[in-house]
Amino acid sequence: MVDYTVAGVEGGVCAPRGFRAAAVDAGLVPGGGPDLALLVSQQSAVAAGRFTSHRFPSAPVRWSRRQLEGGGQARAVLVHAGTANAITGPEGDHDAAALAGLCAGALGCGAEEVLLLGTGEVGVRLPAEQAAEGAEKAVAVLSRRGSDEVARALAASGGVVRQHAVAVAWSEGEVRIGAVAKASAPFAPSFATTLAVLTTDATVERPVLDAILARAVGRSFERVLVDQGPGMADAVVLLANATAAAPLLGAGSEGALAFESALGQLCELLAEGLAMRVPGARKLVVITVHGAVEHAEALAAARAVAGSVAVRAGLAAGQPVWPAVLDALGAAGVDLDPGLVSVRFGPVTVVAGGRVAPHDERAAAAVAAKAQVDLAIDLGAGRAAATITTTDLPPEALRFPRPG
């Protein structure tokens, strides 16, 4: 056990020491308002990222992934709204590289130290000249109080945005972690499910930071499902600029364990908060599959149920739709013995031994009507388990197309 404390602090992505941010109206989204955001570290930061598994990744995703596979250092993250710069061919890659280069020139760093994120329409080229002018304007107005403007810019293309920051203290020191995240509705797991920028003033070596981010994303964004597939522009990036008066967070150290726990909690808060702000969503649905032989099977089964329109639409109507749960399980591609499967809505067992169990239907319906529905499935074959969080699916949620 590690003795540490976590406390909320103000400032979002600028709460950690040594970060400034700004957002400007670059004319990328009609109607005015901030649509290009820039976050800058006062010094080169160790950087890690998790990117979409979509086979058609956006140009910003390709650019940022390539930079992190190289040096693993970054000074800045630039986010443009209006277009995800996806399905734009070699021209999109050229636009991304040019924008990173122009931004780097204004900051006095190398283009490889500028990470890019894009959100908005798919198949629309980035107005590179406008974006470059916006980046230069943003550099001129960077501020320690810029996190709110960054959040506004991320929301310019639609979707929902959340930001948080925490201070993590243990026996040897204190560090801060800041975050801003945006999701377009609908969104879903594959690696991250959304755009998120995370900052910290901790001192962390790249392999340790990369492993910590992977686990944090794995227990948060990867465990929230509101749609069936990843987006082309999905990305989570984390910058650690080593400006806190705290020791190096080495692998397995007390500080690293405290930091990882706090980062995981922060990512869970963001992911679940984004899910509940999807238009029309009224309930959080927590689906846990027990009794699988392997974790991968438990995860596949949980995702199949979480992705079922019939299950989620039924819960939106307050109905404990156990037949739809079994339909989803049966199509999940998981090796199971139907005679061993049981299903519970809260404390009410509705299926046992692969057949309907005598139960109080009103009690089951009362669980399905709650603001949080806990659905437990036991495959009866092993000890592995996995949990996926989703929402109910009212009719109005189906009318929102996925932006990039």
Image (cartoon, rainbow, N blue to C red):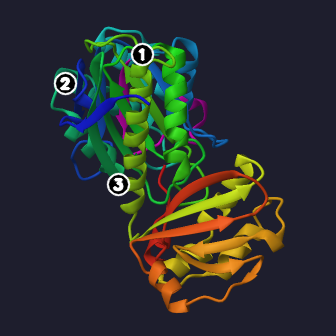
Q: CA distance from mark 2 to mark 3?
A: 24 Å
Q: Quadrant of the N terminus?
A: top left
Q: Which residues are magenta?
A: 75-93
For residue 305, side relative to residue 390 (left or right): right
Residue 144 in percent (x, y) is at: 16, 26
Image vertical order of residue 116 relative to residue 54, above or below: above
For this rendering, which residue is in front, 236 or 82? 236
Residue that numbered label 3 is attached to: 160
For residue 353, side relative to residue 222 (left or right): right
For this rendering, which residue is in front, 193 or 384? 384
Amino acid, disc 3: Val
Would you call the spot at circle 3 few (<14 residues within 10 Å), some (14-19), or many (20 or more)? Answer: many
User: Which type of secondary structure does the marked residue at label 2 adopt?
Assistant: loop
Q: Which mark is residue 249?
A: 1
Mark 1 and mark 2 lie on one chain; the one further toward the N terminus is: 2
Single out the mark in the foreground, 2 or 3: 3
Amino acid, disc 1: Leu
User: Which type of secondary structure does the marked residue at label 1 adopt?
Assistant: loop
Residue 77 in percent (x, y) is at: 37, 26
Q: CA distance from mark 1 to mark 2?
A: 29 Å
Mark 1 and mark 3 lie on one chain; the one further toward the N terminus is: 3
Residue drawn at 54 percent across, 32 percent down: 214
Residue drawn at 56 percent across, 39 percent down: 88
